[in-house]
Image (spheres, helix red, strand yellow):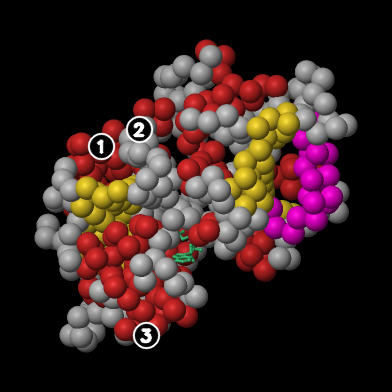
Amino acid sequence: MSFDTLGLKAELLRAVVAQGYTTPTPIQSQAIPVVLDGHDVLAGAQTGTGKTAAFTLPLLQRLDDGTGHHKHPRALILTPTRELAAQVAESVETYGAHLKLRHTVVFGGVGFNPQADKIRRGVDIIVATPGRLLDHANQRTVDLSHVQILVLDEADRMLDMGFIHDIRKVLALLPGKRQNLLFSATYSDDIKKLADKLLRDPVLIEVARRNTTAETVAQAAYRVDRQRKRELLAKLINEGDWHQVLVFTRTKHGANRLAKQLESDGITTAAIHGNKSQSARTSALAGFKTGKIQALIATDIAARGLDIDRLPHVVNYELPNVPEDYVHRIGRTGRAGEEGVALSLVSGDEVSYLKSIERLLKRKLDVEIVPGFEPTGDDGPSEDDDRPPRGHNPRRGGGRSQAKPATRSAGEGHNRNRPGHQDKANSSQPAANQSRRRRPAPRSM
Ligand code: AMP
């Protein structure tokens, strides 16, 4: 399979070749012809599958109708986080390099007026987080009544972050006749409801989840006392000569503390989470990409959507209390066919999290003990959590707990009107081990 057979015009193929891509990924080969044909799409695909190009390339082609400049945006791409919005906009720029379409990116935490000026000058495509886009709509700096194509990227995360009300408000501003593309890594009942409301006779596309591409991600777990995790991590980084490692903590507080500790171990480190300013996050990410920063410590939400090519190492410093987050985390490594290593440091109190993850993956992870770091059973005082567990209560033996009000990291995008979290324990996963495509209704999933 090559890109030439998908129906893309020469200008787009040139841009793809310039990226060094020779073969479309499964989501690309399935979605591109369908989107070009004007169908609505419900795609089960997560970051790392090449989903951004899967919707961006055909979207650019459909907008490039040779009719010259349009005053109002004709495509809207909504994303849950600022980072993802910025990365999608980068892809629009890259793939649209040889077309005359104009785009802009709109998210909170940065100046409103420069965005308004850019929109007023005329753009074909807007990439946005929902809250700031609504601010623009309310200030009448954007007119969404000409939008022909709507993309909801990482729709599950948008719902998780409480954006459903904002999404509904945005939908009310769009014309009824348009093409809708919904991308989501998981299919919760809420996603199905949204898909039912939004999509007309959608083509369903599912591609393998990252956890099933096990040949490119080596996963292992080390059992270790909690208070010795930092020491073990520093040893792994130093002795393994790791130059680029993304480390996940459960909390913002934990991310900051670990970053400080690793710095004192001589490892250049930065933390990235919702309490950091946009400029601090951007510069940490840039430093990490260029190799100036060796270890980037991130919380789940902050890391969502980060596009870092060929990330060799991902460490779960703390296991996520939501098993699906494990899949998202390790999706950061071994991307687009590259090899990667995902390691988890598991303290005694996290063994139940590990079991939940293994149940989700339907496989056991190798649990090893590093000589000199044998667990004593003493995990020390418990860490303070700045986010309550969702859909999992280890004290109740991993049963489905009642949803508590969310305190997910604030500051990722614009999360006004947050109604509390969705209980992801109810998510049903797309079938894992094969790519397939079906038509019709999303209810069948
Ligand atoms: P995404 O799932 O859109 O976040 O993309 C994941 C990564 O795969 C990005 O770093 C892309 O640059 C890369 N990528 C996308 N399409 C291809 C392709 N056809 N071949 C190789 N790499 C790709």
Q: Is residue 241 magenta?
A: yes
Q: Is mark 1 within 8 Å of ligand 1?
A: no
The numbered dot on residue 445 is 1
Whole-number angstrom distance, CA of label 1 to CA of label 3: 39 Å
For label 2, the SS is loop
Asked whether, in this view, residue 177 is left or right of residue 265, the answer is left
Q: Is residue 190 magenta?
A: no
Which comes sooner in the sequence, label 1 or label 2?
A: 2
- Residue at 62% across, 52% down: 340
- Residue at 29% across, 36% down: 190
Which comes sooner in the sequence, label 2 or label 3?
A: 3
Which stretch appears magenta? Answer: 227-246
Q: Quadrant of the C terminus?
A: top left
Can you identify the residue that label 2 sits on? Answer: 428
For residue 18, above or below residue 255: below
Instruction: Tell me the chief SS of the magenta region.
Output: helix
| Mark 1 and mark 2 residues within 8 Å of each other at the beta carbon | yes
Whole-number angstrom distance, CA of label 1 to CA of label 2: 9 Å
Can you identify the residue that label 3 sits on? Answer: 98
